[in-house]
């Protein structure tokens, strides 16, 4: 509850009491109404650089009680697709439960099984703490996770470690792997809008990219994500998604028709 900075998805209606930006007019996630998007041919395909990490690299994987976070080296950058330079900070996932899907964004009202967020900061804004507070200081690349016919081998290095960070607050190091494989193969078609972190402090400083192509995982992999981690007081960490927020007049761009 409010008062000591601790929050949960259960008390999301109280977030603005403690974190005023959470009550702002540029909040995320949103529903993407594909009939209302504005076509923009200026949005270039996203090109990533430096994502195939050598196994000798060690990355921190942490269950922070709200999601599982993989910290990323700042050497992972977005080489094209944004006017500013962005450096990777971390990636994390949002998911549902065996009872229902858990993406944060929805498309024409459809919620997908899950969603991956790769979070970046703009180094010219100074430190991460300063970048977080500057409009456009953060960028998040988002992709939907969907049940497909077979295991997604690129997710195994992440999913096979989940049981080692089952408890809230636990951390493990994992060997480097091909991070790009966690995203869709086609990074040229996407939606773009200005929004916020979907968690307190809800800073309205995020340049969002939501890819059109989804990422397919097997039912078993999605189920592992939904049933392995524990959040507050040993309850299952499930449905860690915020409800969609009003656009308040914001426009969603699309670089495809
Ligand atoms: N969708 S999202 O990008 O808004 C997002 C979430 F929805 C998230 F749920 C999270 S995790 C909750 C915030 C948090 C809690 C603890 C710690 C820690 O102990 O290190 C770190 C973060 C989470 F970490 C993020 N992303 C973070 C937002 C918090 C701080 C800003 C910098 C990294 C992006
Ligand atoms: Zn997120």
Image: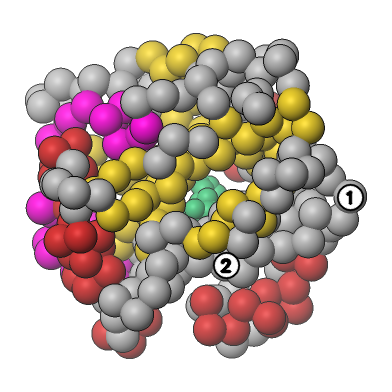
Q: Quadrant of the N terminus?
A: bottom right
Question: Helix, strand, or loop for circle 2?
Answer: loop
Residue 245 rendering spot, x and y as whole percentages: 72, 63
Q: Quadrant of the C terminus?
A: top right
The segment highlighted magenta reads 160-184
Q: Residues within 10 Å of mark 2 (few under 14, many from 20)?
A: some
Residue 239 rendering spot, x and y as whole percentages: 42, 73
Residue 56 rendering spot, x and y as whole percentages: 10, 25
| Residue 170 image-quadrant placement | bottom left
Indicate left or right for 132 with 53 as reference.
Answer: right
Residue 249 rendering spot, x and y as whole percentages: 89, 50
**What residue is shown with label 1?**
249
Question: Toward the viewer: 180 or 74?
Answer: 180
Residue 205 in view, yes or no: no
Q: Is residue 54 above or below residue 16?
A: above
Residue drawn at (61%, 61%) of the image:
109
**Separation of disc 2 and disc 1 at Cα?**
20 Å
Indicate left or right for 54 with 45 as reference.
Answer: left
Q: Is residue 152 above or below residue 73?
A: below
Is 182 magenta? The answer is yes
Mark 2 Cβ inside 8 Å of ligand 1:
yes
Q: Could you tell me how many numbered marks the image carries?
A: 2
Mark 1 Cβ inside 8 Å of ligand 1:
no
**What residue is shown with label 2?**
242
Q: Viewer-nearest of labels 2 and 1? A: 1
Which numbered disc flags the more N-terminal residue, 2 or 1? Answer: 2
């Amino acid at each position: 509850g409010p008062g000591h900075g601790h929050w949960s998805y259960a008390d999301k209606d109280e977030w603005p009491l403690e974190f005023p930006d959470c009550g702002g007019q540029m909040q995320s996630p949103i529903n993407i109404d594909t009939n209302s998007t504005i076509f923009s041919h200026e949005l270039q395909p996203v090109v990533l650089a430096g994502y195939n990490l050598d196994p000798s690299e060690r990355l921190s994987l942490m269950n922070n009680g709200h999601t599982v976070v993989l910290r990323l080296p700042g050497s992972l950058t977005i080489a094209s697709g944004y006017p500013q330079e962005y450096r990777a900070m971390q990636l994390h996932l949002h998911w549902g439960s065996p009872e229902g899907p858990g993406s944060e964004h929805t498309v024409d009202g459809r919620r997908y099984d899950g969603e991956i967020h790769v979070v970046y900061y703009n180094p010219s804004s100074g430190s991460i703490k300063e970048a977080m507070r500057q409009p456009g200081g953060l960028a998040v690349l988002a992709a939907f996770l969907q049940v497909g016919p077979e295991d997604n081998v690129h997710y195994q290095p992440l999913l096979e470690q989940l049981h080692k960070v089952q408890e809230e607050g636990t951390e493990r190091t994992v060997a480097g792997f091909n991070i790009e494989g966690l995203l869709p193969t086609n990074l040229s078609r996407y939606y773009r809008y200005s929004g916020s972190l979907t968690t307190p402090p809800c800073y309205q400083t995020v340049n969002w990219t939501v890819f059109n192509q989804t990422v397919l995982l097997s039912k078993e992999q999605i189920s592992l994500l939904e049933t392995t981690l524990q959040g507050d007081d040993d309850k299952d960490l499930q449905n860690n998604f915020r409800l969609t927020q009003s656009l308040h007049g914001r426009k969603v761009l699309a670089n495809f028709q």
